[in-house]
Amino acid sequence: MALSREQLAQRVAQELQDGYYVNLGIGIPTLVANYVPKGMEVMLQSENGLLGMGEFPTEETIDADLINAGKQTVTMATGASIFDSAESFAMIRGGHVDLTVLGAFEVDVHGNIASYMIPGKLIKGMGGAMDLVAGADNIIVTMTHASKHGESKLLADCTLPLTGKGCIKKVLTDLAFIEIKDGKFHLLERAPGVSVEEIVKLTAGELVIPEHVPEMTF
């Protein structure tokens, strides 16, 4: 079975480490805030100027003035701080973010990412993605393995305009967890119940398969 949005966020949360500063992109990445392991201290950053995001609010804790970069209402963790967007991007561009999690339309075997536009469709702009992929060494992309038409999003070469070049090292899809190195995709884990054959069929770029591919655990 393909992973749900919540399971994708849970698996990404396993990559967090105590003391990390983490930027969560719009969409599925924002859900990671709900699955930070208990007892672990991480500071979640939103590029609009919030460091220390907490879980999504309940009706009792909601504050309409407190939002993330995707304009969703959020909460603040103990020790959180609020600052302007310029300072937020100085933090990103200065390499002070330990982990970045963001979505994408395509990723290829060279570590290139296309995440901000599809030609002919109305877009709001690149947002902070270009700065994030340029300023961070540790990036995890979360996305579906294939389009709704069954076309692979893990390619030999991206076909859409690039957000960044040679910057992506790990991709978590609804089918698999994959590392990018030496110009190839390397299969690390598969979603529970998903076969290696299914992953191979939906991966357009060269895929290296180890002798044993464990299922993800949550």
Image: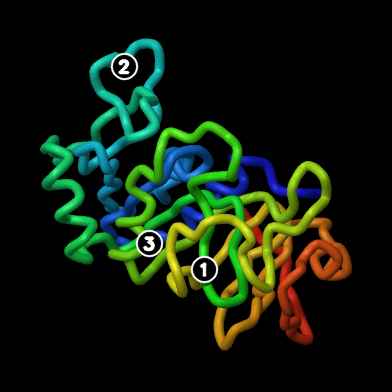
Residue at 12% x, 47% y: name it: 87
Residue 126 higher or lower than 187, as above or below:
above
Distance from Cα at disc 2 to Cα at disc 3: 33 Å
Q: Residue furthest top?
A: 60
The spot of residue 185 in percent (x, y) is: 65, 76
Q: Is the Cβ of the residue at disc 1 closer than 8 Å to that at disc 3?
A: no
Amino acid type of the residue tagged 3 in the rendering: Val
Q: Nearer the viewer, residue 161 or 36?
A: 161
Q: In the picture provided, is 16 more to the left or to the right than 131? A: right
Choose mark 1 or mark 2, whichever is in front: 1
**Label 1 belongs to which residue?**
112
Q: Is the Cβ of the residue at disc 1 closer than 8 Å to that at disc 2?
A: no
Could you tell which of marks 2 and 3 lies nearer the N-terminus? 2
The spot of residue 170 in percent (x, y) is: 53, 68
Q: Nearer the viewer, residue 161 or 76?
A: 161
Choose mark 2 or mark 3, whichever is in front: 3
Q: Nearer the viewer, residue 153 or 25?
A: 153
Could you tell which of marks 1 and 3 lies nearer the N-terminus? 1
Q: In the picture provided, is 175 more to the left or to the right than 194? A: left
Q: In the picture provided, is 95 more to the left or to the right than 215? A: left
Residue at 47% x, 45% y: name it: 29
Distance from Cα at disc 1 to Cα at disc 3: 10 Å
Q: Nearer the viewer, residue 84 or 29?
A: 84
Residue count near mark 1 (Cα–Cα under 10 Å), binned few <14, some 14–19, many ≥20: many
Amino acid type of the residue tagged 1 in the rendering: Asn
Residue at 69% x, 75% y: name it: 187
Could you tell which of marks 1 and 2 lies nearer the N-terminus? 2
Q: Which mark is residue 61?
A: 2
Q: Which mark is residue 133?
A: 3
Residue at 14% x, 41% y: name it: 79
